[in-house]
Amino acid sequence: MILTRKWSVFLALAGLFNVVVWPRFAVAIWNDPRAFSGPDAMTPTAFLMVHAVLIVSAFFIGLLVLGLGLRALAVARRTRSLPSAALSSTLSP
């Protein structure tokens, strides 16, 4: 399946957004007073662990979406520059 250039750009931007936003959110959660408890506030709480799982999974899904978007952009660029005869031979399985 070949995506249009617009969808490829959308995927790349959505992935880039996730890769940029989630690390900043991780810093905010780490600095939140609910993240640690116990003596000297060194024991991670369930609040921190749940958000850590959320952040890590969303970050890697964002990386995957970014990679798919960039790959789709590369395919769209390559197919746009090929003549129609070469295009039909590269698209057939």
Image: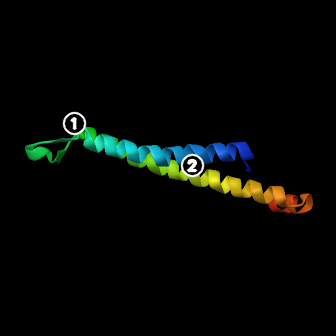
Tag nearer the camera, 2 or 1 = 1
The foreground one among 52 and 6 is: 6
Q: Residue 58's spot in the image, x, y percent? A: 45, 45
Q: Which quadrant of the rendered structure holds the C terminus?
A: bottom right
Seen in the picture, residue 6 relative to 93 is either above or below; the reply is above
Q: Which is more N-terminal, label 1 or label 2?
A: 1
The foreground one among 82 and 61 is: 82
Q: Could you give the CA–CA distance between mark 2 and mark 1, rounded to whole angstroms? A: 31 Å
Q: Residues within 10 Å of mark 2 (few under 14, many from 20)?
A: many
Residue 59 visible in the displayed image = yes
Q: Residue 50's spot in the image, x, y percent? A: 31, 41
Point 85% across, 61% down: residue: 82
Which numbered marker is on residue 65? 2
Point 75% across, 54% down: residue: 76
Amino acid bearing label 2: Val
Task: Provide the secondary structure element on which disc 2 rests.
Answer: helix
Q: Is residue 50 left or right of residue 23?
A: left
Q: Identify residue for label 1.
A: 34
The image's colouring method is rainbow
Point 87% across, 63% down: residue: 86
Task: Provide the secondary structure element on which disc 1 rests.
Answer: loop
